[in-house]
Image (spheres, helix red, strand yellow):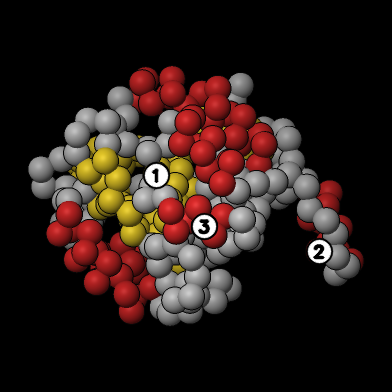
Amino acid sequence: MGAPGRGALDSRLKSLRAELGVDACVINGENAADGIGITPRLADQLFAMGADAITLGNHAFRRTEIGPYLDASNRIVRPANTARSTPGRGLAVVPLPNGSRLAVINVLGSLFLHPATSMFELIDDLVEEARRETPLVLVDVHAEATSEKAALARWLDGKVTAVVGTHTHVQTSDAFVLPKGTAFMTDAGMTGPHDSVIGVEAELAIRRMRTGLPVRFETAQGGVRIEGALIECDAETGKASSIEAVRVPYP
Ligand SMILES: [Fe+2]
């Protein structure tokens, strides 16, 4: 989320990767630019900070200059269920430093987010395509409703390594491995300023809600944390053995 989130990752992500023994790191970057959208420069920065892949969400195209970058890069995905005419793709297969390959899929839930197609209409084909390439498959389900995320995870149990939710900016305490080996967590949370209303200066968010008038949002500064999910899995089968919340104060 904005400069505070990027700053935390810039100084801490590489050491965190080493401490946690991380082979692959996927960042949801849809709020990287001032809390909304992402630019080519910022995507490059996130890769340089230690991301192997970037996922997006309902704000994927907010910065229009990202369009050609989405078409050109095979390490960044936008939601697969946006309109056909939108740039980029919803599935990427990313080579990892340890020699294996990770498939990353990004989909949008329906509540409040108005995707062109329901994620349930296309997820089976996407997962099949991913599994033809590698047993390691991560699904970032970018959705408002906890129920949609849980339903998708249950539907995909045994077919993908992990289903991890994003979008609410609020980390959930429900990380667990489903019966057939798919790790699930409703929301990975937010890397950014938590003294805020989901990353926005509280006073500005409150003013907009109380008055109904347009208020220009600014990213908050305080209470920065790196949040995410740490998943352990078998590289041969793609099955997960554990998932836990990551919640690291910064500095
Ligand atoms: Fe979002």
Element type at marker 3?
Answer: helix
Q: Gap between marks 2 and 3, in whole Å?
A: 35 Å
Q: Which mark is residue 209?
A: 2
Mark 2 Cα shell of 10 Å, populated few (<14), some (14-19), many (≥20): few
In the picture of the structure, the residue carrying the numbered disc 3 is 68
Mark nearer the viewer, 2 or 3: 3
Mark 3 Cα shell of 10 Å, populated few (<14), some (14-19), many (≥20): few
Would you place residue 203 above or below residue 132 in this image?
above
Note whether ligand 1 is within 8 Å of mark 3: no
Q: Position of residue 52 (x, y in %)?
A: 37, 39
Can residue 9 be seen in this snapshot? yes
Element type at marker 1?
Answer: strand
Do the residues under discs 2 and 1 have CB atoms within 8 angstroms? no
Q: Position of residue 99 (x, y in %)?
A: 19, 34
Question: Which residue shows up at 61% across the image and 56% down it?
Answer: 65
Disc on the earlier residue, 1 or 3: 1
Question: Which residue shows up at 27% across the image and 31% down it?
Answer: 97
Amino acid on which disc 1 is placed: Ala
Q: Which mark is residue 53?
A: 1
Amino acid on which disc 3 is placed: Pro
Note whether ligand 1 is within 8 Å of mark 2: no
Amino acid on which disc 2 is placed: Met
| Farthest-out residue, left | 236
Image position of 204 (left or right of 152)? right
Mark 1 Cα shell of 10 Å, populated few (<14), some (14-19), many (≥20): many
Q: Position of residue 231 (x, y in %)?
A: 30, 40
Q: Quadrant of the N terminus?
A: top right
Q: Position of residue 36 (x, y in %)?
A: 65, 53
